[in-house]
Image (spheres, rainbow, N blue to C red):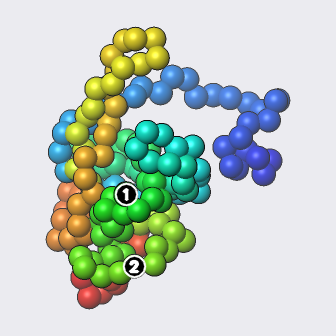
Amino acid sequence: MSEEMKNGALDWNDTIETDDQEYVIIPEGEYLFTVKSFERGRYKGGEKIPACNEAVLKLEITTKDGPVTIMDRLKLHKSMEWKLSQFFRAIGQKKHGEKLVMDWNKVPGAVGRVKLKPRKYKKDDGTEGTTNNIDKYLDYDADKMMIADEPVEGDLPWGDEA
């Protein structure tokens, strides 16, 4: 396998197999997640937030029907510091009231909890669509990190003291 293929890029003569992937809308509720990947990106700016760095996260959400992958983009801007704090509290790197130097190297593989709420939006063609929307990242709680009475695998933030 070529180096490009490992990163997801396809070569002109690579073999393809995967057909349509159904986009699954997850019902509103609280779910466990694992950060499957993190990429450094750049937000071009908009009405409320100027151009700034952004973290592009791929989260695997654990549902009773199996895993679903969703994306989230965290803007590295002072006006969004509250959401960055929410995220880092959710994966156990930060506690309320404490300062934190964000350690993005520990983000891939981290586990946490999130509240999802489907959101309606208008597509480019004028029709209405629905997407999985992260309403809130929930503070890390070791007692809630279980799926069917099995612990969630991944980097747990406080080791044995949790």
Using the image, determine if residue 22 lies above or below residue 82. Answer: above
Q: Earlier in the sequence, mark 1 or mark 2?
A: 1
Q: Nearer the viewer, residue 130 or 109?
A: 130
Q: Give the percent coordinates (x, y) of residue 142.
A: 22, 73
* Res 100 label: 2
Q: Secondary structure at mark 1?
A: helix
Quickly name the residue at label 1.
Answer: 80
Q: Give the percent coordinates (x, y) of residue 20.
A: 51, 22
Which residue appears at 33% of the width and 16% of the height? 128
Using the image, determine if residue 155 lies above or below residue 2. Answer: below
Q: Say which amino acid is labelled 1.
A: Met
Q: Say which amino acid is labelled 2.
A: Leu
Q: Is residue 65 visible?
A: yes
Using the image, determine if residue 157 lies above or below residue 126. Answer: below
Which residue appears at 30% of the width and 70% of the height? 89
Kindly report the distance in space between the C-alpha atoms of the residues bearing marks 1 and 2.
15 Å
Q: Secondary structure at mark 2?
A: loop
Res 16 quadrant in image: top right
Label 2: how many Cα within 10 Å (few below 14, some 14–19, many 20+): few
Q: Nearer the viewer, residue 53 or 16?
A: 53
